[in-house]
Amino acid sequence: MFFNLALRNSRRSRKENGLFFASLLISVVAFYMILSLSRQDVMLFLAEMESDAVDRLLGMIPVFYGITLFILFFLIYYASKFQLERRRHEFGVYLMMGMRRTKLFALLLTEDFGSSILALLVGLPSALLLSELVSLVTAHLTGLGIIGHQVTASAEAALWTAAGFLLIKLLAFLILSGKIARQEIGALLMDMPEERKRQLCTGIYAAALVLGLCGLTAAYAMAISGIAWQGIGQMGFTLVLGILGTMLFFFGLRSVLGFLAMHSRKNRRLSVFNFRQLQEIVICRSNTLAVSSLLILAALCFFGAGTAIARLYGQSEQHVLDYTFYEEGADSAAVVKALKEQGLAAEFSDLFEMKAGHIRSSEDLEGAYQMDSVLAALEELPESRDRDVLLNNLSYSSYPYLISLGSYNRLLAAAGLPELDLSADEAAVYMDGEFTEDVRRGLLNEVLKNRPKTTLAGSDCYLTGEVQTVNLVTDRLLTLSFALILPDEAFAYHTQGDYETYLDAVLNQNAWKEKSLLTAISDMNQRLNQAGISYESYLQNMGRQLFYVVAAGYITIYLAIMFFVIANTIIGVQFLMGQQKSKRRYQTLVRLGASYQMLCRSAARQIHWYFGIPAAVAALSSLFGVRSLLKGLLSVEMKGNSVEMLLVAAAMIAVLCVLEYIYIAVVRRMSSRYLLTLMVPERDNA
């Protein structure tokens, strides 16, 4: 009988408050996914390529886990408080019928434990499936197919998920059940009293609203201008301004709602009632709304910026080369011979030399190359920060690297790009994408259109074409901020035959067409290691990109989901609690002739305002927050894609707006269900 009652009550609680139960399921899924990160095949692959970075990332997981547990505790506390407050009368009846308080405590504990176990039983398998799906998608973001994927279930992650979840559930339950158990039977049988809070004059609220808007505007300006990223102090001051501004804005918002109530359309039913209800809710819970808005803002920023960074890091560099062979003092012909002896040369569709060296035709190293005409042309362009940075960088390029045109044309052919055609006195500019961005390259291209004359070791040299950026080697063996591509004869003269030779290679597609490129390169690495041949493979470049995808994708999406779920659940639960405490007002409206449909429309409008205000403030702030995050976190080569990233971020924010609407629909349904119970008139005991 006892367990049947607990089972029935637990089932009824989940049905009446499905929003809270769904939030718990999402939390379980998010906990497992972040805790099982180290066991996923993508991370196992990265551990070999970027072990230090992966160790630092995994070392941060317990911190994220602890922070979200702390925040989730308050969600569970407030949501459970709402559930228990709704059943006050029921508990009073149990005690009136002779149930001991210890048995009531055991009943509530059994109900809560049953719901928690069900959430884990549903959430953990769902988390396992979703984590595998996300792992596959993450690998696909690199554009290189799927690694030999194997499903891996992490028992440790499941254990920590269950332990943390049950711990905070039990802690919240003990606090709340203790409060219920100490109350007298008469107090339990009474309806919940309405909240009262002393109101101040309208001028104070209006002043708080203006100060809040000023604080938010200042925070937005500091974030977008980049001042916030200049140091920890500036970042802290920006965050304080933003948080304080949000708090003051919501504190002063009651003046706006009061104005709307006074000037609302009189012909619209219950219009004044709706705004008065909202005004009272804001008066009592302005801090809760402000915190919820900040959580939604954090979710929008993390989800938008994180997804954009993860998406575009996977496409940030053009993949041309698979291998570069280089050993100081060794001849590339010896490497080719070693590859043939090991039967590996046939595995490559293209093998060619990349020649690069310093200027040896001039004894004056500091003045070996002069490009005053280029600097003068740049100074004539409209003033901008990008122009000034480019001028500063080029002013130090007096001793650039030289690149052989024949070698670079082989690289362009491998990339499927048109080859360069240079006369004897011409040169093309090369700048590695890691050291510049699209805007600055565009400025330099404007100058190069006029074929400016420069001086190389005392000889005239005309710069032509556009800035070249295709990577000379596979990864990091050679990265040049500024170099000149010269015809082969000019290259041989100015280097005096003293240059370095890198052997670039492209794998034959037949070697990997039936499997992923990652697998093919991994297999080739093992064979090269056995042969004792020094190399640099695309896996190193790939591993770095994939790490950014995982770090930005997993962590930011995890935080975004947790913050979004917590914020919206708090808003929904707080509204439903406030509606229940206003029970007598709705009953009075029923007695005055209000229909069920009229009450539902009234509640729907209140819900739209109650959810819409913090969500709208967060959405507006996210326009500045996402831009600020991209400005502060992007590397130089990625900033050229900032517009595309903002578009991706906007699409992700739109997805969260759809989820916001789903939350609103769920709360409306729960509100309508509660209002239906108020339509039965109470008996008059006279």
Image (cartoon, helix red, strand yellow):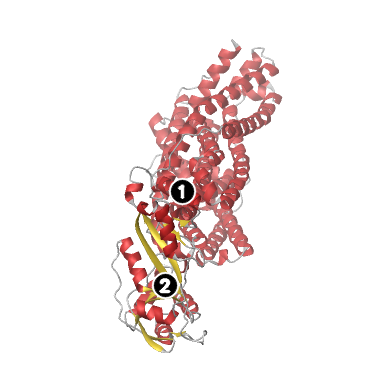
Which mark is drawn over residue 278? none
Q: Amino acid at mark 2?
A: Arg
Residue situated in front as seen by the camera: 36 or 457 = 457
Residue reaching furthest to the top: 1
Q: Element type at marker 1? A: helix
Report the Cα–Cα distance between label 1 and label 2.
Answer: 42 Å
In the image, taking residue 459 as reference, residue 78 lies left or right, namely right
> Is 102 placed above or below 536 here?
above
Residue 455 position in % (x across, y down): 41, 87
> Which callout, 1 or 2, points at the residue further toward the start of the chain?
2
Tell me the residue that label 1 is attached to. 527
Camera-nearest label, 1 or 2: 1
Q: Secondary structure at mark 2?
A: helix
Q: Is residue 256 visible?
A: yes
Q: Quadrant of the C terminus?
A: top right
355 and 513: which is toward the camera: 355
**Is the N terminus in the top left, top right, bottom left or bottom right quadrant?**
top right
Which residue is under mark 2? 440
Residue at image position (52%, 51%) is 49
The amino acid type, in three-letter code, at marker 1 is Arg
